[in-house]
Image (tube, rainbow, N blue to C red):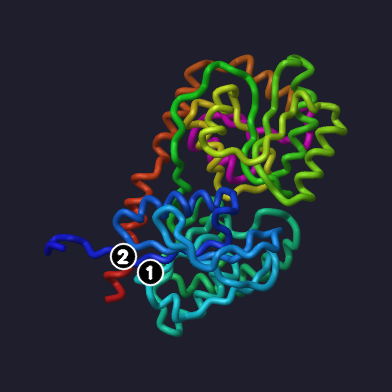
Amino acid sequence: MDAYSKPALRVLHVVRQYPPSVGGLEEYVSQLVERQSGSSRVTVLTLDRVFGSSRKLKSIQRVNHAIVVRVRYVGFRRFFIPFVSPRLLRRYDLIHLHALDQFTDLISLYRWLGIPPIVVTSHGLFFHTRKFDAVKEFYFKTISRMTLSRVKRIFAVSRNDQVKLGEIGIRSEILPNPIEPFPWLYAGRRNLVYWGRIAENKSVDRLIPFFRQVIKSDKNRKLFIVGSGTSSDMQRLSEGIRSAELPQSIIRLGYLDRADLQALIEDCGYTISASRYEGYGMVQVEGMSAGLLPVMQKNSAFEELFERSGAGLLLDFGNPVAAAERFLDWERTLQEQEHDRARNFALKCAWPPAAARIEAMYRDIIASEC
């Protein structure tokens, strides 16, 4: 190594779920890890089971360019206790924690035991549903406040997260989730596509009555639903489609890899989401990179995305008749350049500048520790 080379950083990413688990958080960390692996020695620490499964995964495994270390835990999706040794954590120069959960709470406690500096990316915190709101607020204002006070730097993925953190006196800087852009795929089609996790907070079932109203004006239009979830969530969605008597119009496809998803996007004009809560809206930006326009539930994260991009439509899927009428009226007035505007915005949200900013922050923190 010459005198001007930067030494390879030893970075540990900590995330509760990682591939083979599928979701936006897993995708974000996977992409960041791959970009950092060329200049850093990257390890991922995660749990040893996919939520909802009893199958144990390998405790140590190479996945692409990173080593993945999986640890035991007790608990379930909303609250778990991982078994993590401070000795493992001391091997690294910096620890990057993703989301606010018990991994973050526990590892922040270990700062007293001499582990390396910690940074956190918010990823929507843990306010994804209205369930247990009072408990969540109490936890956030007590445990989470103490946890985050031990952290060196916090990236909020949205203004909404930054405001929420500010309520407990925690400063953060905004870094929206970057994306891997698709090529231009829009070909003038009018089908709609949802892709992402099938979960309660995503409210995918609310798309069914909305779409039933939409196809009254066009029987040939399709709604594609792409994603996986728990067996109960998937069964509930299938039953909703059957009850609406729309099996030929609403196509449920399960998980698709990027190549198959790209082929499907070519047959669509819009991404759609009825999610009551989002941390950011990465899928919508990915869709915009392909030239699709986002049709989104009016929530704080999607309102922020709509304001920044100037693209798409905000609806209230709680009223499917009014939402469908609003969508069809909007669609009639669309200009082709709106698809170009959406793509131009999305391309500004690509990975290279974000990855460079994250690495610069790492080195700044490590230098300040010396």
Position above or below: 3 against 235? below
| Residue 219 horizontal/vertical position (percent) | 76, 16
Residue 348 tag number:
none
Number of marks: 2
Report the residue that reaches farthest toward the right: 243
Name the residue that disc number 2 marks.
9
- Please give the name of the residue rendered at 80% of the width and 31% of the height, measured from the top-left corner: 209
SS label for mark 1: strand
| Residue 126 horizontal/vertical position (percent) | 63, 60
Q: Quadrant of the C terminus?
A: bottom left
- Please give the name of the residue rendered at 79% of the width and 17% of the height, measured from the top-left corner: 216
Q: Is residue 167 visible?
A: no
Kind of residue at disc 1: Leu
Q: Is residue 109 visible?
A: yes
Label 1 environment density (alpha carbons within 10 Å; few <14, some 14–19, many ≥20): many
Report the residue that reaches farthest toward the left: 3
Name the residue that disc number 1 marks.
94
Residue 314 on the magenta span:
yes
- Please give the name of the residue rendered at 44% of the width and 28% of the height, measured from the top-left corner: 183
Position above or below: 36 against 136? above
Which stretch is magenta?
A: 293-322
**Near-viewer residue (273 or 169):** 273
Marked residue nearer the N-terminal end (2 or 1): 2
Kind of residue at disc 2: Leu
Position above or below: 211 against 365? above
